Amino acid sequence: MFLTGATVPGGDASNEDWMAATPDLIVVLDGATVRTETGCHHGPAWYTRKLGASIIAIAADRQLALPDVLAAAIVDVANLHPECDLQRPGAPSAAVGIVRVQDKALHYIVLGDVTIVADTTAGLEVISDHRVSKTAAAERALADQYPIGAPEKADALIAMKRVELDAQNREGGYWIAAAVPAAVEHALVGEFDAAAVRQFALLSDGASRLVDDFQTTTWEEALDLLANSGPTELIRRVREIEDADPLGERYHRNKKSDDATAIYASTR
């Protein structure tokens, strides 16, 4: 299997995405943006790095299914900072995408809005969980009315985040890796026959916005771009569109650029 990947921060701050690949395991994490008090002195970048390292270590036990791996990693990282108030909704959290090659199958788990797209003999399969974007609908609509950088937008985004956090890891809301391993029970879990998969990719939402948000590219075209030019070129095209619309007037979004991560794999 041929693998290539790239991760690029959205600005000058630390990259809150995280990625890793071994011969049989691929992981992409996307730390949730902090806008409110968190009750924790660690940030999303710390959280994704610790969670990612724990996933890699625990997944070495190939008897553990991916949901069990992720649940154990969530507990592992929670135990690293017991001094923090991890019951507060704003505590560090992350969206997760994992693919493992095992027993002639590609096993996957998605928790949050990381995307897995697979080109199979049966057609294109796209796995992502966008439940978070369906929360705080009124507050999101209000924030979209203001240009990026406006004080009114900053205030609206804080109000939006508070409502969004009220829906975190609860029925009717959305599910994400934070401090409660039970969230994994709501992940998207499945597998593909490895022989039926020609190529696949894992992307954080900062990279998948080329398709999901900007809609300038189809998933078929995105996979072709990854195959022929690599993840760096896909992210460059994302940045090109963002730079042409710095205030978010054409493509409404919460910030000009987001951390962007993409890993591409060819099985042929």
Image (cartoon, rainbow, N blue to C red):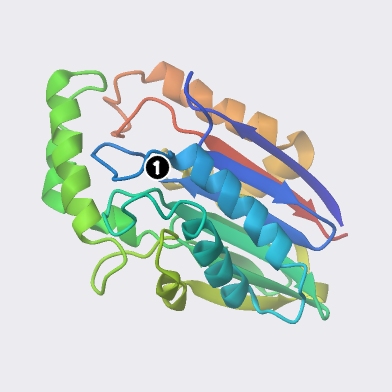
Residue 197 in view of the camera = yes
Query: Which residue is labeled 1 in the image?
Result: 213
Q: Quadrant of residue 243?
A: top left
Q: Position of residue 6 (x, y in %)?
A: 68, 36
Image quadrant where one finds the N terminus: bottom right
Describe the element under mark 1 as helix, strand or loop: loop
Residue shown at 33%/38% (left/top)? 34
Tally of numbered discs: 1
User: 128 or 90: which is nearer to us?
Assistant: 90
- Residue 204, visible in the rendered structure: no
> Residue 157: percent from the left, percent from the top?
20, 36
Compared across the picture, whether 109 is left or right of 31 comes to right
Residue at horizontal 75 percent and vertical 34 percent from the top:
229
Amino acid type, residue under disc 1 in the picture: Asp
Q: Is residue 147 above or below residue 159?
A: above
Residue 191, compared with residue 151, is above or below; it is below
Where, by quadrant of the figure, is residue 226 drawn? top right
The percent position of residue 10, horizontal first and vertical second, equals 48, 27
* Residue at the image point whose x is 27% and y is 36% from the top: 35
Looking at this view, name the residue that lies furthest to the front: 83
Q: Position of residue 46 (x, y in %)?
A: 52, 40
Q: Nearer the viewer, residue 158 or 138?
A: 158
* Label 1 packing within 10 angstroms: few (<14), some (14-19), many (20+): some
| Camera-side residue of 106 and 98 | 98
